[in-house]
Image: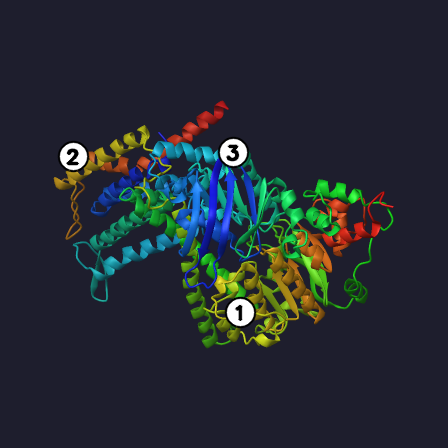
Amino acid sequence: MEILDVKDLNFTYPKAGSPTLKNISFSVNEGEFIAVCGATGSGKSTLLRLLKPELSPLGEISGSVSFCGKPVSQCRSASEIGFVMQDPEHQIVTDKVWHELAFGLENLGLPQKSIARRTAEMASYFGIGDKFDKNISELSGGQKQLINLASVMVTEPKLLILDEPTAQLDPITASDLINTVRKLNRDLSLTVLIVEHRLEDIIPVCDRLLIMDSGSIIEYGDPRDVISRIYDRPEIMRAMPAAARISAFLGEKNCALTVREGRELVRSYDNSRVLHTDHDDRKKTNNSEKTSPVLEFKDIYFRYERSLPDVLRGLTFSVYEREIFCILGGNGSGKTTTLGIASGIMKQYAGNVLVFGKKIKDYKNQSLYNECIALLPQDITTVFLRNTVREELEDADVDTSSLPFDLTPHLDKHPYDLSGGEKQLAALAKVLALKPKILLLDEPTKGLDAGAKNTIMELLRKLTDSGMTIIAVTHDVEFAADTADRCALFFRGEIVSDAPPEEFFSANSFYTTAASRITRGHFENCVTAGKAAELCMLNGKRGAE
Amino acid sequence: MRGFSELNPAVLMLYYICVIGTAMFSMHPVIIILSFIGSAALLVTLEKRPHLKLHLSFFLLFLVMSLINPIWYHNGVTVLFVVNDSPITLEALLYGVFAAGMILGVLYRLRTFTMIMTADKLMYVFGRFSPKLSLILSMALRYVPLMRTQTGKIRRTQKALGIYRGDNIADTLKGEVRIFSIMATWSLENGIITADSMAARGYGEHRRTSFSIFRFGKGDILFLILCIIPTALIIWSFAAGEVNFSFYPAMSGISDSPLAVTCYAAYGFLSCLPIILEWKEELRWKYLMSKI
């Protein structure tokens, strides 16, 4: 049964020169799981919001959206179409978990008894029964997003729309959330429309894939067919799962989507001729140099309060000049705390931190921040204090012409209105004006689309080439594999392994990139999709000769 | 019946009004002593670890308040000694002691009130008047800590960027002003997301109901009766003028008429009702535990 039917939808924002959406037509059957992807600014969010009358933006609109056979504005869309947004924090309205779950039902004017039953039911289904009378502020980001999902599901919607629900979550909680959505889709035949940047988990489970580019739908259909039709669009392929990217490089007709299919594909190229390529030159020179360390942690112990357990236990590591050092590890393992200590915001209770051979506490009068160390936090909006990017940059004495990237189109926007990637660049501009020698980054790729991520990665390499040392804390294994000179795994407040990314990710079997899992046992030290495809090419297809 | 703190918040509220209201309008020594015993015992029971510092500061407060009265007021017939030509009288001293005891009893009682009546219970009580008010209170309770965390985050970020340096006051002030103004923007910005999320979940489309996890059960009715009857007795005897006590010029005796004695008993019961409940629950729990 057709649940949603969009016909010739056009939409123009007030005062905008060109339409944001152009001739959008598609339909969705009941129980389908639809993934929507496209670069930032391609009109995905606008399209989703037009499907939910309560959130529709103002502007010039033509065409029709019908839901269950009726125009969507005549439906009981508040309860029948659920909408989950990106930011876990601000979608939450009330202070208690139970109140948040009851909120939608209170709005429908349901009596006490049925609210009690439905909230209890939802809490059990989502496994949050033990948090029922907790304060929401005590929960983690992933739990908050789960509450958001549950509090939308209480009104029993027929269509669930999710706009980048996992952008602010770490990969493990993100895939938990996706699995929950998948489970809802299977158990209740709930129709799901989901926008995501992180497609590795989504593509293999979705029924249809919708790709948008500058306001139009360029492809819509079975994910395998769709992806094989866009092999020649590198800017879109960049966001696809590793297996699909390898297929695209090799021009395979039958596109692989999962790690399992990827392995089958690679097996057909494995004739043991070339097992590995050399590391690229840049990394080689860096490793052989072994300059003196610029930052050293010596046996650091830290806890937040006297009565709480240690967060860092005897943490010891050194970072050398001009390297990109990535720290990976689970939530709460102490990664962010480490950056806090390195930047002097937090104080360890035992051990020494040396910056350029000098103890951190000997840097008096903020001289630590004067052309020495700078930290970009995870919540990048906290960097901005002014009303326009221009004022922001003037405050920090930034010379826009000397920046390695271009911010001129955004100078008159409010920093909060920038997209994730633009925010990151604007913040970097502010930091670079301080001419730091050591740059500390906390989750620099969080919530970015594939294109923006690529820009950041290239920029970081450029910065190290000009003499900067970068320490990044990240959950993003693909980013670390592509960018880092050295990776370290953090566990229970100390570093348990540290090595160049090729060695590091080949040695890990779970905490590693999809490309590494695909090529394991076939090729050596291959952790990126690009390298995997290169090796396949060098080997040639089995039986081709 | 459930333990005292698990009763319906509206019932708890009524209890506090009764017990504090009657204590505040009486300077009768018996009432004051009973009020103090009841509230102090409840506070000690509720505190998992005794806050010695707090009790010490309360005791100092008590000393200061009791001594101020005899120093300033020289009424009374029993002169204890004379300082700087001013007589210090027994009546004024005792008045000070009992007035301080009354205030301390009420303070202790209010402290147990803040421990028992958490924000969500207060919201339940006031939300009875209007579901909208209850929603606003709930949103405020969520927003205030959220804003505090965000301000802290911004401050730390700016410190690590070293932009507003702490070494001169003008710069620090400028930084603080900027942080304040960006917090206004931040609140508005996130207010829009919250408003969207509320609209998406149908806020404002129907008449709202107000859901709460608090129930009104048999125990609450029983407690209400146990609370209202003694209060009525107390008010009656107050009105009949049977429990008057005057300190000046000479102390009157403590009345022992049947109505006065009933009033003491009623007040003692009212004052100790929570502690009786808590102890009863504990005993019951121990008994139930012994069966496991």
Q: Amino acid at mark 2?
A: Leu
* For discs 2 and 1, the disc positioned in front in the rendered view: 1
Left or right for A503, reference A232: right
Badge 2 local density, few (<14 within 10 Å), some, or many (20+)? Answer: some
User: Which of the two discs, 1 and 3, labels the residue nearer the N terminus?
Assistant: 3
Residue sitting nearer the eye, A207 or A289: A207
For the point 31% across and 32% down, the residue is B220
Q: Which residue is mark 1?
A: A409
Percent coordinates x, y for residue A55 in the rendering:
41, 50
For the point 67% across and 64% down, the residue is A458
**What residue occupies the far left of the structure in this picture?**
B240
Q: Which residue is mark 2?
A: B259
Percent coordinates x, y for residue B29 in the rendering:
23, 45
Q: Which residue is mark 3?
A: A189
Specify the subunit that label 2 lies on: B
Callout 2: SS: helix
Residues tagged 1 and 3 counted as in contact (Cβ below 8 A): no
